[in-house]
Amino acid sequence: MNMENKLEILITNDDGIASKGLHVLAGMMAGYGNVTVVAPKNAQSGKSAAISLDTALYLTEESKSDGIRMFSFNGTPVDCVKIAVNELFADRMPDILVSGINHGSNCSVAALYSGTLGACIEGTLYEIPSIGLSVNDHGPEPDFSAVLKYGRIIIDRFIENRLPKHVYLNVNFPALPDTGIKGIRFAKRGYGRWVKEFTKEKDADGKDCFRMSGQFENLEATVGNADHMLMHNGYISIVPHSVDTTDYNALDCLQSDWKL
């Protein structure tokens, strides 16, 4: 991809069309080319690579100005990528897909549940270079100064250097201003899990119900290149993920040991 030419850029997220992070990202990416935003009408966090089946879906143009056109879609992040590719980019695929800026980290096990990264998976399946950006702050008004400063550096490299087939990038920023960032590090997806995941309460009718909450159990507190530990220590982490989930070492072992 030639940075001297304007790119066709697809942006989506899982926090929804009203998310501040989405609008900050659209403004940042407008400097690289023509921006088309297709984002869920409502928040779709935790949807991973889910799609909407047997549901009427509606694409609504929300605004169009200064090289940015914005659409809402009452589906999941993956649905948003699918409708963009099929309806808005029918004659030409986007040059890149950028998902985010997510309000909240997508490090460690969160990467498995993330709708932000589900959109990147879908973009990668269409062979669109795809990258997800998240900041470790769930509030409605995170400090995006680090994303605006270092995100441009990362996007420049992302555009200049083509990713291997099947690979997308997961970038996580600490909840720090740009002056507090220690640097950018390549990382592995950290190992951890959620425990004590539900709180029990009564609904309006007095029936028992459950709400998901939970605590994160860190299983790699001493691993220097785990993404969640790097972020905890003030670094921006970049993890390359693959949509090919085959474990080739295990495949070789199975073929050798099972003797089928």
Image: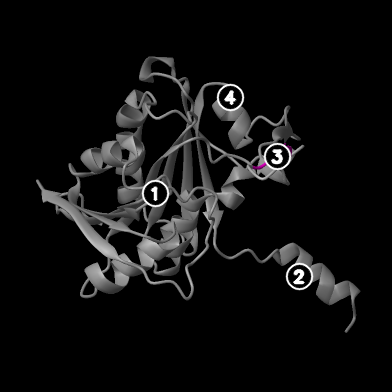
**Helix, strand or loop status at disc 4:** helix
What amino acid is labelled 4 in the image? His
Q: Label 4 vs label 1: CA separation?
A: 23 Å
Q: Nearer the viewer, residue 29 or 39?
A: 39
What percent of the width, then of the height, locates residue 142? 39, 26
In the rendered structure, which disc, 4 or 3, sits on the residue that comes first in sequence? 3
In the image, residue 206 above or below residue 228: below
Of circles 2 and 1, the one toward us is 1
Q: Is residue 89 visible?
A: no
Question: Which span of residues is magenta-colored?
Answer: 198-203
Q: Which residue is mark 3?
A: 202
In the rendered structure, which disc, 4 or 1, sits on the residue that comes first in sequence? 1
In the rendered structure, which disc, 4 or 2, sits on the residue that comes first in sequence? 4
Q: Which residue is mark 4?
A: 232
Q: What crowding class fits label 2: few (fewer than 14 Cα within 10 Å), some (14-19), or many (20 or more)?
A: few
What amino acid is labelled 2 in the image? Leu
Residue name at image x 36 percent, y 61 percent: 80
Q: Is residue 201 magenta?
A: yes
In the rendered structure, which disc, 2 or 1, sits on the residue that comes first in sequence? 1
Name the image quarter holding the C terminus: bottom right
Residue name at image x 45 percent, y 38 percent: 134
What percent of the width, then of the height, locates residue 176? 44, 20
- CB-based contact (under 8 Å), mark 2 and mark 1: no
Q: What crowding class fits label 1: few (fewer than 14 Cα within 10 Å), some (14-19), or many (20 or more)?
A: many
Q: Is residue 218 magenta?
A: no
Of circles 2 and 3, the one toward us is 3
Q: Which residue is mark 2?
A: 251
**Helix, strand or loop status at disc 3:** strand
Determine whether, in the image, residue 201 is placed left or right of residue 128: right
